[in-house]
Amino acid sequence: MVTSVSSFGRSGVFDWVVQRLTAVILAVYTVYLMAILVLNPDLDYQQWQTVFSSFGMRFFSLITLLSIVAHGWIGMWGISTDYLTTRLMGPKATVLRILFQIGSILLAMLYLVWGIEILWGT
């Protein structure tokens, strides 16, 4: 069972379920955007802006953005705990892992704030 303070959930099963649910959300969003592009081959900027100006699309995009952050964090946490170990990296592995995780969190939060600003900003 995962009990690390840096994990996303309280258990590995929870993280696994979140990763699968966020993957489904990302897939549905991708299919939806592809459908818009295929059904509107001559889509111009004004029409694209109209698509994203509706509350429903902004909300769906926000849920997708949150899914990207959660999905990415779980994946990066898995990479850092699996590969940045003392056995593989030597005695500085813990410091490297913590720095990697802090960098991942900061980058994810930057992208989240930036995405929210793009979606809901003026």
Image (tube, rainbow, N blue to C red):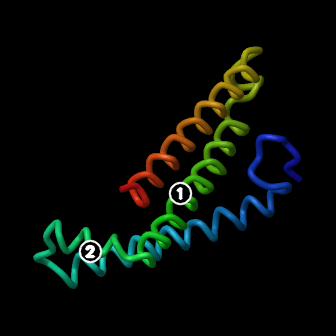
Q: Nearer the viewer, mark 2 or mark 1?
A: 2
Question: Could you give the CA–CA distance between mark 2 and mark 1, rounded to whole angstroms?
Answer: 24 Å
> In the image shown, does 28 or 44 lie closer to the viewer?
44
- Amino acid on which the number 1 mark rests in the picture: Ile
- Amino acid on which the number 2 mark rests in the picture: Thr
Q: Residue furthest top?
A: 91
Name the element at disc 2. helix
Where does the image place residue 5, in percent across and percent down from the top left? 83, 41
Task: Residue under label 1, please give it.
Answer: 68
Q: Is residue 75 above or below residue 25?
A: above
Are there few (<14), some (14-19), or many (20+) residues within 10 Å of tag 2? Answer: few
Are there few (<14), some (14-19), or many (20+) residues within 10 Å of tag 1? Answer: many
Q: Residue furthest bottom?
A: 39
Where does the image place residue 82, in percent across and percent down from the top left? 71, 39
Task: Residue under label 2, please give it.
Answer: 50
Residue drawn at point x = 65 percent, y = 31 percent:
102
Name the element at disc 1. helix
